[in-house]
Amino acid sequence: MWRSIGRTRTASPVPYGWAPAVVLVLVSLVDRMEYSLVSAVLPQLQAEWGFGDAVAGSIPTAAAITTGLLVVPAAYLADRYDRGRIITVVVLVWALATVGSALAPTFAVFYLVRMGLAAAEAIDNPASASLLADFHPSASRPTAFGWWRTAAYLGGAGIVLGGVLAEWLGWRGAFLVMALPGLATAVLVSRLHEPERGWTHGDTWRPHRRSGGWWWAESESWAERPP
């Protein structure tokens, strides 16, 4: 079955294993690396299209505004639709937008494509956070979220990588190369199983070791959480 990552649930502190978290960490990492790419190639963009620092500063500003406007609607979608499919479509869109950035004939087109990419990036965050919460009960959830957020900061390495690629291939070549990780990540996310929503029951269910495996306790009553 194609959507096999995180499909099997066991009675343990990491019931679906770490594979789903690894996929979502990769989404966050690739997202931030691609976002950082503009900063790396900015001198070449200014040299080609002749815009000043004020216009350059408006690129991340407009992207942030676009993201802010779409996060709540994106959360609405994540509450109601298949989150794995949402992220798959979003990652594919931003990979294509990265290709579009490389092929942009004018700065106006480039600017609009970057806003479209910011919109796509805004949509994946609520869905990713929701999936992490459902893949990980309270025993392993902080670690999963910690790695997810760490990936966002490590994505700043995209500035260095983008600079190296731009010196070697030019800024258009740098964008084309950076689209490849996005496409690969989209394939991985498409294999992510959609877990049952809210099965961890917030923070009231905690794992305890007993003979025969892991059990789940809420207050004084014991109950084994079924797969």
Image (tube, rainbow, N blue to C red):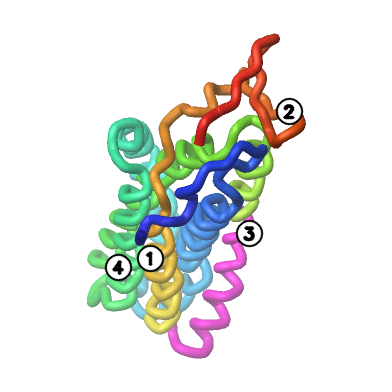
As for residue 159 lying within the magenta part, the answer is yes
Question: Label 2 belongs to which residue?
Answer: 208
CA distance for labels 2 and 1: 36 Å
76 vs 101: above or below: above
Q: Nearer the viewer, residue 220 or 21?
A: 220
Magenta-drawn segment: 153-170
CA distance for labels 4 and 2: 46 Å
* First along the sequence among labels 4 and 2: 4
CA distance for labels 4 and 3: 23 Å
Can you tell which mark lies on residue 101?
none
Q: Kindly identify the residue that appears in the image at 65 percent across and 11 percent down.
A: 221
Q: Dot 3 surroundings within 10 Å: few (below 14), some, or many (20 or more)?
A: some
Q: Amino acid at mark 3?
A: Leu
Question: Label 3 belongs to which residue?
Answer: 154
Can you tell which of label 2 and label 3 is closer to the viewer?
Answer: 2
Question: Label 4 belongs to which residue?
Answer: 96
Q: Kindly identify the residue that appears in the image at 66 percent across and 38 percent down.
A: 13
Element at label 3: helix
Pointer 4 with pointer 1, Cβ within 8 A: no
Can you tell which mark lies on residue 187?
1
* First along the sequence among labels 4 and 1: 4
